Amino acid sequence: MTDSRAVVASLSLKDFRNFERLALEIPPEGLALVGENGQGKTNLLEAVAYLSLLRSVRGARDADVVRFGADGFFVDAIVRAPQAHRLAIGFERQSRRKRVRLDETAVDRFSDALGVLPTVMFSPSDVELVAGAPGSRRRYLDVMLALTSRGYLRALQHYRGALERRNASLRGAQRGGGRGVDAIIVWEAPLAKHGAVLVRARRAWASAAAARFAERCSAIGERAPVTLTYNASVPADGGDEVAARLEAELAARRETDLRFGLTQAGPHRDDLALLIAGRELRTFGSSGQQRTAAIALRLLEAETLRDSRPASPVFLLDDPFAELDEARSARVLALLGEVGLGQTLLAAPRESEIPRALTSLPVRHVRDGRILS
């Protein structure tokens, strides 16, 4: 019978964050990583997530992930998802060049290795998904949908490229250089075409996830009604109308965009609206309500990844229950079990803080970038 869980069987690190060297065998069920703050528990989880995203899950630049004083970093792993692969990533600080190898073959397009290992990371910083600026929620949508749809990933890459070039043309026109307005107009059709793919996919996901978001929040313990909707800066009903409306809006705002040197309409300005009792969770929700909503979003991410591929994701739990009482922690773990709790890497400051449902995980202690046991 094929194992339906994604698994990291072995992990090797060189000069990644505070790990000078690491060679770690990981059991199929996972590990509990125990140690005081600043010893490397989160860094190890970040390394596993790097195998999925090919970039830091914490938003750090590659140069900042390199251990202090080192020339670069290297991450190497044997993974199963459910097929077995060897995935290796190296980065050189001086050249700022990153190389990716999949099954001993150099990957020319990083997108070919993106998401080979599905992971979902839960951490206290997830509250920024709810309390933070719209960019945090857009990134959440883009990462999740790019990992589950090659079409979305391609559209996102093309959209970002066209947006960068239109913005450069806007700034060039401000300075009186370049080809003026013609250099701006040429990028509006590609922005509208690829932007429409993003809007339709985000809206479809939000529509399908809205009821489950409310259910997950309620199951964790939230009593007030919560809602999730996709707010597009350029409203349209769907189909080809999205692209047409986007292109029309870009043309209508061209003069304003010229003054500011920025493109101010499109999916890069949209938001995932989260409300509690009809008011913005970001502004009016308590810290506990915001944390509940953030956990619900991560649960939805795990479900989306699970439903798009033959293996449930690796769960990276970075002390996610630090501010939850035991009852809510138990409810979250029960919901993770419903999603299909696969291999789990849990980071906790003390063994006494490992949730009861995860005490069967083998324990390894982390100190100063080393695994002690």
Image (cartoon, rainbow, N blue to C red):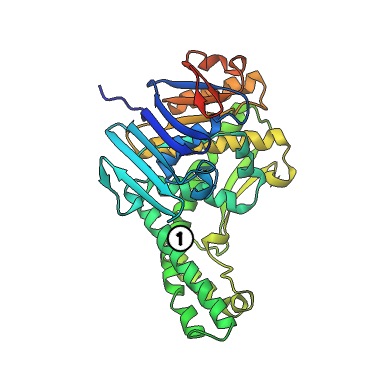
All told, the count of numbered labels is 1
Asked if residue 299 lies left or right of residue 285, the reply is left
Visible residue check, residue 299: no
Q: Is residue 180 something one can see in this rendering?
A: yes
Q: How crowded is the residue under tag 1: few (<14 C-alpha within 10 Å), some, or many (20+)?
A: few
Which residue corresponds to the image point at 64% horizontal and 19% vertical from the top-left? 327
Viewer-proximal residue among 223 and 70: 70
Q: Dot 1: what SS?
A: loop
Question: Measured along the vertical axis of the image, is residue 332 above or below residue 243?
Answer: above
Query: Which residue: 50% across, 49% down?
Result: 63
Disc 1 residue type (three-letter): Gly
Task: Residue 51: name its quadrant.
Answer: top left
Locate residue 99, reporting x and y percent. Answer: 35, 49
Q: Which residue is mark 1?
A: 238
Q: In this picture, is 43 found above or below 281?
A: above
Closest to the observer, 369 or 57: 369
The quadrant where residue 25 appears: top left
Residue at 31 percent across and 24 percent down: it is: 3
